[in-house]
Amino acid sequence: MSHIPRSPAWPSALWVIVLAVAAPTVMASQNLLQNGDFLSGVAGWSLETDAGFALSWDDSMGNPSPGSLRLSGTFQGVGIGVAEALSECFDRPSGTGFEISADIFAETADGTVKCLPLLTRYSGPGCTGGRLQHGFPANVQPTETDIWHRIATLGETSDARPSFRVSLFFRLLSGEEAASCTFDSVTLIEEGTASAEVPVLSGGGLALFGAIVGLSALWLLKARL
């Protein structure tokens, strides 16, 4: 009787089962920003501001890890002072929707500072021409102070405004005490993309995984004999 070689297909099939046992992994959302975590600085972000405000990097504070972008200062003019940290420029087809999110920590003496992420759109390509800010930042409620919390903004491109930047927005009334907005974990994702999930084996899945590994080892031992 001729010897029939064992097929390696069986252990390959076992690993297919292993992958099936694991909880499904959804494709992670891609953060389009080059530097939204500020782990080593604020490269890629520029300051557009009224007098009295400054942009800095805080290497001791962040959420979840140290490293964050801070807008701070006072406004001595009339009315409302505004500072913005602007990201790199993006050009996208008309009708592309985005979600902009950021972890924010506001510090102020009287609780009237406003901090939020926005979409600043431009009338020309490459973030040129006139600009329009998505939403009405002057009408938003004051940001809750002295705690980290996450704020999200939705926006989309249009034929009239095809390019945009993410704007980390800081608003302060004239004559208020010195205040600051600290931003971390800033994300820009296209709407409709899935969030990331880490595959996890259940208790039964772990047991089956162990059994499969054991059978695979036994098969390899027999194949060598």
Image (cartoon, rainbow, N blue to C red):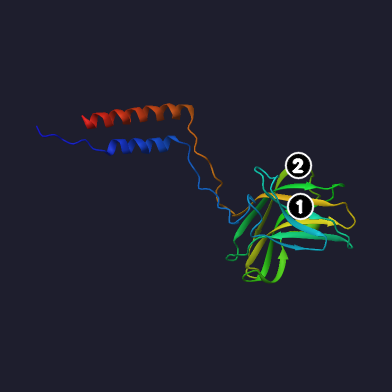
Q: Report whether residue 139 is seen.
A: no
Residue 147 badge: 2
Q: Nearer the viewer, residue 42 or 145?
A: 42
Residue 11 x, y percent position in the rendering: 31, 35
Amino acid at pointer 2? Ile
Calculate the distance from the C-alpha at mark 1 to the C-alpha at mark 2. 13 Å
Residue 25 x, y percent position in the rendering: 49, 42
Q: Which residue is mark 1?
A: 115
Residue 104 x, y percent position in the rendering: 72, 48
Is disc 1 placed on a helix, strand or loop?
Answer: strand
Q: Nearer the viewer, residue 91 or 168?
A: 168
Q: Is residue 215 above or below residue 113?
A: above
Amino acid at pointer 1? Cys
Is disc 2 placed on a helix, strand or loop?
Answer: loop
Residue 201 x, y percent position in the rendering: 48, 32
Q: Is residue 161 above or below residue 110?
A: below
Q: Report whether residue 123 is seen.
A: yes
Mark 2 crowd level (few <14, some 14–19, many ≥20, 10 Å Cα): few
Q: Nearer the viewer, residue 190 or 198?
A: 198
Q: Is residue 222 above or below residue 58?
A: above
Q: Which residue is at a point 88% across and 51% down the rendered structure image?
A: 177
Dividing the picture into quadrants, the one containing residue 129 is bottom right
Earlier-in-chain disc, 1 versus 2: 1
Dividing the picture into quadrants, the one containing residue 189 is bottom right
